[in-house]
């Protein structure tokens, strides 16, 4: 059987293919715009979550006597690490040593021996200014939360309050 219009034999499928390709390109552009917006929303949500968890954990830690053997302090730090995006949580003393961490091998290590080293400036600023800080790293891969605690001196010690810092590193 011969087609009455031989040009339609090629033109119609080509036109359909062209419309399909243009439609797919439009869908791809819309998808990438949505993914970009979604990543911004995800970043904002994670910053809010880090801030909320840090504030809650810091307020609970302020109320108890902190030492590496403290069951309550360890429970608070470990509870905060139930978040699947949380990589590391650490309680740093005024000498910048890790007192407690969700990673036991970091306990007792100095700041320079831990992943917190990349955020040492932010940690020191938060400690000196007594201000909570939550920031995104330059590569937009991690979020760091730093929450200073003006800790009471141990019982029987009348010295000044110790300046401990609770720090979190989240995977963005």
Image: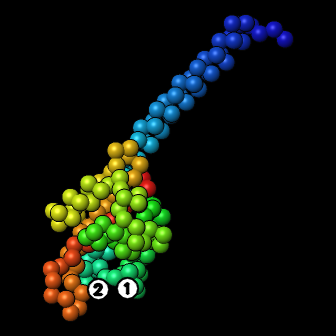
156 versus 110 height, above or below: below
Relative vertical location of residue 79 with respect to residue 143 in this rendering, above or below: below
The quarter of the picture where residue 66 lies is bottom left
Q: Position of residue 86 (x, y in %)?
A: 43, 63
Mark carried by residue 65: 2
Does residue 86 appear to the left or right of 135 in the view shown?
Answer: right
Which residue is the extreme one toward the right?
A: 1
Q: Quadrant of residue 112?
A: bottom left
Q: Residues within 10 Å of mark 2 (few under 14, many from 20)?
A: some
State the scheme by which the image is colored: rainbow
Residue 121 placement (x, y as % from top left): 26, 54
Q: Residue at x 46, y 32 (%)?
A: 29
**Residue 166 visible to an observer of this rendering:** no
Q: Residue at x 57, y 25 (%)?
A: 21
Mark 1, secondary structure of its residue: loop
Residue 70: numbered disc? 1
Quarter that holds the N terminus: top right
**Of label 2 and label 1, which has the lower sequence position?**
2
Camera-nearest residue between 47 and 117: 117
The residue located at (31%, 61%) in the rendering is 145
Give x and y (percent) for residue 122. Answer: 26, 56
Q: Residues within 10 Å of mark 1 (few under 14, many from 20)?
A: few
Q: Secondary structure at mark 2?
A: loop
Q: Is residue 104 or residue 38 the one in the foreground?
A: 104
Does 35 sit left or right of 15 as displayed?
left
* Distance between mark 2 and mark 1 Cα atoms: 7 Å
Q: Is residue 139 above or below residue 120?
A: above
12 vs 147, left or right, is right
* Residue 157 x %, y %: 19, 88
Does the CB distance between marks 2 and 1 fall below 8 Å? yes
């Amino acid at each position: 059987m011969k087609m009455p219009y031989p040009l339609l034999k090629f033109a119609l499928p080509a036109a359909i293919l062209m419309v399909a390709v243009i439609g797919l390109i439009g869908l791809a552009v819309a998808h990438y715009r949505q993914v970009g917006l979604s990543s911004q929303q995800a970043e904002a949500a994670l910053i809010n979550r880090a801030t909320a968890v840090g504030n809650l954990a810091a307020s609970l830690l302020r109320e108890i006597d902190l030492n590496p053997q403290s069951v309550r302090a360890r429970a608070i730090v470990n509870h905060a690490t139930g978040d699947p995006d949380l990589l590391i949580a650490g309680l740093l003393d005024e000498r910048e040593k890790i007192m407690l961490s969700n990673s036991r091998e970091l306990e007792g290590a100095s700041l320079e021996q831990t992943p917190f080293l990349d955020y040492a400036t932010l940690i020191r600023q938060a400690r000196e200014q007594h201000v909570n800080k939550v920031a995104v790293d330059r590569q937009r891969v991690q979020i760091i939360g730093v929450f200073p605690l003006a800790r009471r001196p141990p019982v029987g010690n009348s010295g000044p309050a110790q300046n401990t810092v609770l720090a979190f590193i989240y995977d963005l």
